[in-house]
Image (tube, rainbow, N blue to C red):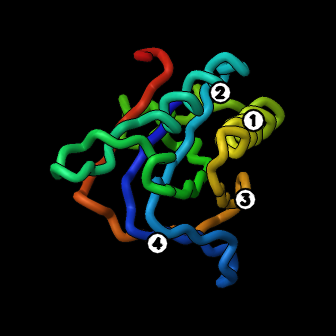
Amino acid sequence: MRAVVTRVNYASVRIDGKEQGRIGKGFLILLGIHMDDTEKEANTIADKICGLRVFEDDNGKMNLAPDKVGAELLIISQFTLFADCRSRRPGFTQAARPDTAVPLYEEVIRLCRERGFHVETGVFGAEMMVDSENDGPVTILLDTDDL
C-alpha cells in the first residue's frame, strides 16, 4: 500500500458538485492499494498514519501524533499511486482491482475510526474534486514495502 499523507488546515472532496466529505485540521490521505496487498498492509499503514508525529508541540517541533491535536482524516482512494511510468503513458496493472481494493480501503478507514479518529472519505472509483489547504507544507510518502 502507498499513501501520500498531507498535513492540512482543511480538506474536502466533491463528487458531481456535491460535497462528499470535509475535515478541519488533520491529514488528507491519498491511498493506493497494490494488487498483492492484504489486511496486513492495511494494518501497517493505518498504524503508521495514526501515529505519525508531524504536528508541532509547544516548542514548534514536529513531535505530536494526530490524536494529540484532535486531527481528522480525509481518506481518498488513489489507484494512480501505482502507476508504471516507464513509458509516457502510465500503466496501472499493479493497482488492485476493485474486488480486492474496496475491502482493503474500507479496512483502513475502519482501523482509523477504531483508533478514535473522525474519518471522512471519497467514493471508491468516483471522479472526485479534492480541495485542501496544506499546512507547512508537510507531505509524507508511505509505502508498506518500506515500513
Camera-nearest label, 2 or 4: 2
Residue at position x 45%, y 25% in the image: 143
Question: Residue 125 appears in which quarter of the rendering?
Answer: bottom right
Mark 4: which secondary structure?
strand
Label 3 vs label 1, nearer the camera: 1
* Residue located 58% across and 42% down the image: 79
Marked residue nearer the N-terminal end (4 or 3):
3
Residue identifier under label 1: 107
What is the x, y in percent for residue 15?
Answer: 67, 73
Q: Nearer the viewer, residue 103 or 70?
A: 70
Counting residues from the start of the chain, the first of labels 2 and 4 encountered is 2
Query: Residue 123: which disc?
Result: 3
| Mark 4, other Cα within 10 Å: few <14 / some 14–19 / many ≥20 | few
N-term mark: 3 or 1: 1
Where residue 120 appears, as percent x and y from the top left, is 66, 60
Q: Earlier in the sequence, mark 2 or mark 3?
A: 2
Using the numbered discs, state the Cα–Cα distance from disc 2 to disc 3 in whole angstroms: 18 Å
Up-down relation of residue 145 to residue 109 (above or below): above
- Where is residue 52? Give x, y as percent: 41, 36
In the image, residue 94 sits, relative to residue 6, either above or below, namely: above
Q: Nearer the viewer, residue 144 or 32?
A: 144
Amino acid type at image mark 3:
Val
Q: Is residue 80 above or below residue 44?
A: below
Circle 4 sits on which residue?
131
Q: Which residue matches tag 2?
A: 42
